[in-house]
Structure formats: structure tokens, C-alpha cells
Amino acid sequence: MLRRARFELPLQEQWALLQRVGELHVGGADASGEPIVRVLHHAIADDALWFHGAPGEKNRLVGRRVAISAHELVARIPSYARDPQRACPATTYFRSVAGRGRFERVEEASAKAMGMQALMERLQPEGGYQPIHHDDSLYHSALKGLPVYRIRLDHMVGKAKLGQHLAGPEIERIVLALWKRGGEGDLAAIRTILEAHPAKPWPDVFRGPGPVRLIVHCTLRERAQAGRLLEGQYWTQGQELASLEKVHELSPAWVGALNPEGDLVGMARAQSDRYRRAYVMDTVVTPAVRGRGVGTALMKLLLNHPWVREVASVGLATKNAGPFYRRLGFRSDDGFSLYRRSQ
Ligand SMILES: CC(C)(COP(=O)(O)OP(=O)(O)OC[C@H]1O[C@@H](n2cnc3c(N)ncnc32)[C@H](O)[C@@H]1OP(=O)(O)O)[C@@H](O)C(=O)NCCC(=O)NCCS
């Protein structure tokens, strides 16, 4: 495969990246040829990028061709993942988009309102304001005075550098180095990198019994599935489904099991300060696959998680699964169902 094609980010993913990143770099030259570059918050609506702002320097770009750039760091890959001595293999995995188009000032009130509403939905998704309509007297004068800008991109390129040129064993070494380091973003990067190499088998540490794959970062879809797994368990009685879906993203240590269809069939998580104490919660496997080792595989992965493996003690409470946890090295010190990992 041509090197370039291998690293190309498909168009749909380019737009998804523009949607995810918080802001864009927008650069161009004004009428006198002077270069200007700005970081701007943007929204996407009507197949265009929308911006707002005071009538400052960027106003000098109106009517001119500009370039935009967006970038998303996936992981800083340490050199030691590929070579124990040489610094040379150190690299960065990323996704990026660059595009070109004309920088326009939008004058029509209804278009301005639409662009600004899209911006609010992005920057304040929790709501708490009256939606922006051009015929609403609340916004009439504000919209009139507010400079709103738009770019319709007529050229876009996207790139994803995720080790596509590397062979399976090298990818495995990189993923294991990220698992060992467990720094910010490393756990999400493991998933991204493994999924960018669908033909390569996942490292043993992320394989459960049979065809089950183990993950250490969850997507929105899996958060919803995790909520359903937890719903109705004895320790979640009376809790709203919405709260059972939200907790996962905020857990420093989260592990899940996926079946071959990619559905979540089990999970466990821990709150942890990384060095002194961790507390295991929400261990659950869907009834259809219980008794096949999925729960044990999840717990072993959780105990080996960067946020758990170094802590002095791991606690949990259970009403019914004492023997399951005892096999994993947990002990009861006080007879009140509080178990600790044997050190
Ligand atoms: C506990 C649980 C996560 C285990 O998952 P699993 O995938 O079935 O676990 P494994 O297949 O790895 O089972 C390991 C062993 O533990 C045993 N075990 C599982 N749950 C047990 C329980 N509640 N009490 C006693 N033993 C249990 C299994 O029988 C199995 O024994 P075996 O190997 O001799 O057959 C699962 O049973 C579950 O989701 N239960 C409901 C939710 C729950 O109670 N979670 C624990 C809250 S603290």
C-alpha cells in the first residue's frame, strides 16, 4: 500500500475529528500579504465551520482564502517500546485534519442564529440558556452586533498515524509499553491503536476466555451497555440508569469484556489514588456467559491495571461473591465482608 494512503483518515472521520476537537487553528494572509493565524472555537452546521468574535484582526481575513488545522494527540510512544537504548523510535501517534476554504462574514440574522446555536450546543451541551432564534427579541440586538464568520471547506485532508506501517509484534510491544506506563491518555490509546490494526491479534493480556476481548477504556456505547449490566444488581437498587451509565468515564481503573459482536458482556472498575488505596466496584458479567472465566479474567486485568497494581491494599465489599474474590487473593480481616488483596 502507498505510504500516503495507509495513513489517510477517511472523510467521515475527518469531520468526526473536527467535531471532537475543542478549537481550530485558522490562518491566512490579509490584503497586504501579512500572515495571520488564530485559534478559534468552532461549530459545524450546514456543512460549514462557524465562528464568532469581536471585529478584531480576523476581520482582515474576510473574503480571503484561509487554511485550517486540527490535531488530536493519541499517544506519545516511548522509544523504549521498540529499542531499549536508542532514543530514535520515540514518536507521536495522532490524528489530524487540514483544510482550505474562504473566510466569510455572515450577515443574515437567521444564518447567524443557526451558527451561534450550533456553537452553544458544542460549548455548553448541558443547556441552561434559551435556544438562539433570530426572531427572538432576547437575541435580536446581540445577533445584530455580533460578527459571525463561516468557512466552507473546499479541500480537506486527514491523517492518522497509529503505527500502520509496523508489524504485529512491534504493535504489541508498543501497546504493552503504554499499559505498563499507564499515563494520561495511554489507556484510550491502547484501544485506538489495537482497533487500527484489526487483522493483528490482541496481546494475551487483553484476551479473555475464548473469543472474548478485554478493554481498558470505554466508549459512549459501552457506557450505556455497562449501565444496563449494572441495572437491577443488588447494590444498585434504586439508582437511576443515567447515573449507572455515567460513572464509568470517571473511574480511573475500568475494564470491560467484549464478545465477538463487540457488545459488552462484563465489567469491573476501581476507584483509586494509584499508590495507597483502591476500591473495587461493579464487578458484573452478563448471565449468559457466567462461569466461563470472564469474571476472573476481568478481575486479574483490574488488579494489574496501572491505577491498581501498585496500591498497598485493594478493598471491596460483597454480599455474595466472597469465594470468587478469595480465589483472587482477597481476605477478610474483620468479618464484615471487606476483603483485601494479599500482599
Ligand atoms: C461474580 C461474577 C462477576 C463472576 O463472573 P464469572 O464470569 O461467572 O466468573 P468466572 O467464570 O471467572 O467464575 C469463577 C468461579 O467463581 C465462582 N463464582 C462466581 N460467582 C460466585 C458467587 N457469587 N459465589 C461463589 N462463587 C462464585 C464460579 O462458580 C466459578 O467457579 P468454578 O470455576 O469452580 O466454576 C458473576 O457471577 C456475576 O456477575 N454475578 C452477579 C453480580 C455480582 O454478584 N457481582 C459481585 C458483586 S461483589
Image: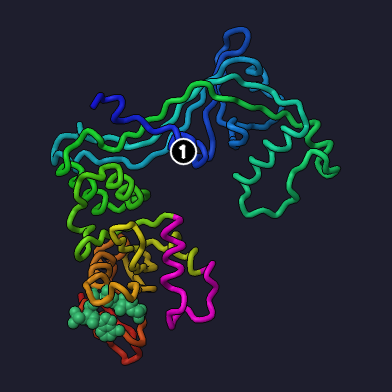
Please say which color scheme the image uses.
rainbow
Q: Is residue 333 above or below residue 233?
A: below
Q: Quadrant of ligand 1?
A: bottom left
Q: Residue furthest right?
A: 137
Q: Which secondary structure, mark 1?
A: helix
At horizontal 23% and vertical 27% (from top left) the residue drawn is 1
| Image quadrant in which the C terminus is located | bottom left
Say if 86 sits above or below 207 in the image.
Answer: above
Q: Name which quarter of the figure residue 138 lies in.
A: top right
Give the answer, above or below, for where 33 lies relative to 277.
Answer: above
* Dominant secondary structure, magenta: helix
- Judged left or right of residue 154, residue 342 is left
Residue located at (58% from left, 36% from top): 44
- Name the residue located 24 percent from the left edge and 48 percent from the top edge: 175
The segment highlighted magenta reads 220-243
Instruction: Report the residue marked by disc 1.
Output: 17
